[in-house]
Amino acid sequence: MPSYITVTALSHPGLLRDHNEDSLVVSPWTLCGTVTENPQTLVFPLGTPLVVAVADGIGGQPAGEVASALTVRQLASCGPSLDSEEAVRDALGLCNHAVYAAADRDPELITMGTTVAGAVVLSESLLVFNVGDSRVLDATEHGLRQVSVDDSPPLAPGRRTTSLVTQALGGAPEFSAITPHVMTSPLSAGDRYLVCTDGLTDPVPEDALDDLLRAHDGGRAAFELWKSAIEAGGPDNITLALIGIGG
């Protein structure tokens, strides 16, 4: 039976952006718009709901780092109560309201928005959630399997990625409700999940990510994933968290 959880995480602006608009929560800790020099690993007992999520401020619009920070801090405050799909949907709705409310108070923040993706680890299951195109990937023995659902328009022929999203927290001049993607997966010792922003998945193909996760674990895996995005040009902020289920 699983008995503990490891989370290894890092956040980096990449090579082309002048600042980091990504944020990260490993409840109750948050990391907002900053840089980790090395992967950090935390260990938690299995039991109380543990939320692990990334938020990616929408580029080309103001204050993405504010929207992503608001979102992860809201999730951190809700963390222990996130024990069902309904609770996760409600929490994401609160995040959406918080982003719009902050924009209403400050004209310079109008249209700020963020994606979010993550997982809540429960004693016997995992609640996977997302709004936007940040991702949660299950590192199975048969290869990586995406368990989040990209909110993106159809790709043009020959294109593997797009920077457009069809749904986000905030991001519009007036309030718009969201329909979060939330699903439940069973939990077993040895399971591994990758939660990340598109600064990793856009420049690095999924088969390359799979190869790295097969070859490495923990801090080394997180470092090699980050390095692969940097070697691919580091076009965007890179934030990732590796969740490991130990027995």
Image (cartoon, rainbow, N blue to C red):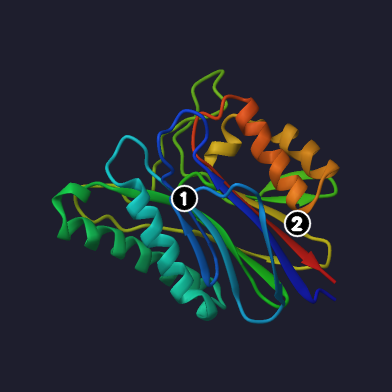
Q: Secondary structure at mark 2?
A: strand
Q: Which residue is mark 2?
A: 192
Tell whether 105 sits left or right of 57: left
In the rendered view, tell whether residue 59 sits above or below residue 23.
above
Tell me the element at label 1: loop
Q: Is residue 169 visible?
A: no
Q: CA distance from mark 1 to mark 2?
A: 25 Å
The circle on residue 34 is 1
Name the image quarter holding the C terminus.
bottom right
Vertical side of 203 occupied by 115: above or below:
below
- Position in image of residue 69 (x %, y %): 39, 58
- Are discs 1 and 2 less than 8 Å apart at CB? no
Amino acid bearing label 1: Thr
Q: Considering depth in this image, is 36 or 7 the residue closer to the camera?
A: 36
How many circles with numbers are drawn on the protein?
A: 2
At a point 67% along the width and 35% down the height, the residue shown is: 227
Q: Is residue 178 visible?
A: yes
